[in-house]
Image (cartoon, grey):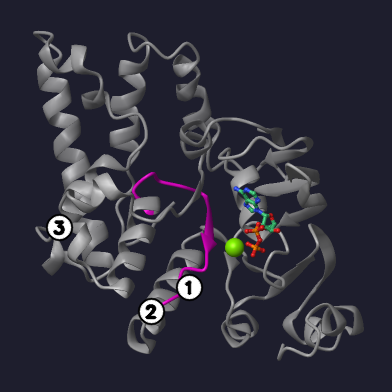
Amino acid sequence: MSSDIPDASDVAEAADSADAITDEPEANDSAVEEAAKHVPSGAPPLRVEGLVKRFGGVTAVDGASFEVEEGSLTGLIGPNGAGKSTTFNCITGVHEPAAGSVYFKGEDVTGLEPFRMARKGLVRTFQIARELEEMTVLENLMLAPKGQIGESAIRAVTPGLRGEVVEQEEAIRERAWETLDFFEIDHLATEHAGNLSGGQRKLLEMARALMTDPEVVLLDEPLAGVNPTLEEKLLDRIHQLRGDGYTFLLVEHDMDVIMNNCEHVIVMHQGSVLAEGTGDEIRNNEQVIEAYLGEDI
Ligand code: ADP
Ligand code: MG
């Protein structure tokens, strides 16, 4: 995949070669996973079928089914509590669904842990956790990539492997700088993440997601609290990355943003999909209008 951000396959390869001696039982299949990447399989990059997730007596997701077309910028909307965030969490392995399936390029990946999903190329953005607030922006990015061999303490102290670790760290550092540059936050590299403005945080969250070399990126309200200038910049970057072949599924409250940027819109209501179509189709859909109870669409 070509983009302004250099391909991190060198980083991934370094990680792959180290997998055999890490303590992850299934880690050595990641070379195959990497090879299978970027090969058109005919199946959509993301498909969910009959997803169900309950919290006690609340059914947050109630049989949601939809698919996301390759290279698209697809919008996922719905009134508050419709189950959008829970759907994202079920897709990316944060929650295990009670029923239903998640398919990534045709492969059933239901219930895989988030880091395995990220390895395959499916990520969502996360708010910067408290412990990451204490770290610099650059450190935040360097911690993001999947399968860093430096994470394994044994490797870092084993003679002969140390060089490999250093080499990989340099590749990650280089990619981190490129990513910072791409989002125009390179001037913040040494700033603690906790000191960033709301909008800068959103840029960092997205930059972190991109450091994992994903194919499908799920964005949950990436523009919340972002000023108009940064909002434009973020949308710009999303379009640029989409042009490079990334696929996006975007949850966003601001209906104008969805209508102006997404060619396909999926509407969730009470845990399942109520309607799908172009922005215009959705805007004029009676069921959708009713679900929003008079809110502007
Ligand atoms: P949306 O993102 O569309 O606003 P959510 O997926 O956050 O909706 O929530 C869907 C429903 O599930 C809501 O009723 C919400 O209160 C409930 N819910 C979400 N997460 C949890 C949780 N961790 N524990 C209990 N209930 C939850
Ligand atoms: Mg939500």
Q: Which residues are magenta?
A: 210-225
Left or right, 152 with respect to 108, comes to left
With respect to residue 128, does 259 lie above or below?
A: below
Q: How many marks?
A: 3
Task: Name the residue beneath numbered marker 3.
Answer: 192
- Say which mark, if any, is on residue 239: 1
User: Sequence-wise, which precedes: disc 3 or disc 1?
Assistant: 3
Q: Residues within 10 Å of mark 3 (few under 14, many from 20)?
A: some
The front one of 236 and 4 is: 236
- For the point 79% across and 57% down, the residue is 271
SS for callout 1: helix
Task: Name the residue beneath numbered marker 2.
Answer: 226
With respect to residue 260, does 100 lie above or below?
A: above
- For the point 51% across and 23% down, the residue is 32
Residue 193 percent location from the top left of the image: 21, 58
Left or right, 232 with respect to 248, comes to left
- Inspect the image, locate mark 1, and give the three-letter code of the amino acid beneath it: His
Q: Main secondary structure of the magenta part?
A: loop
Image quarter of residue 288: bottom right
Residues at discs 3 and 1 in contact (Cβ within 8 Å): no
With respect to residue 78, does 211 lie above or below?
A: above
Left or right, 64 with respect to 227, comes to right
Disc 3 and disc 1: Cα gap in Å?
28 Å
The front one of 175 and 51 is: 51
SS for callout 2: loop
Of marks 1 and 2, the one in the foreground: 2
Image quarter of residue 96: top right
User: Sequence-wise, which precedes: disc 1 or disc 2?
Assistant: 2
- Inspect the image, locate mark 3, and give the three-letter code of the amino acid beneath it: His
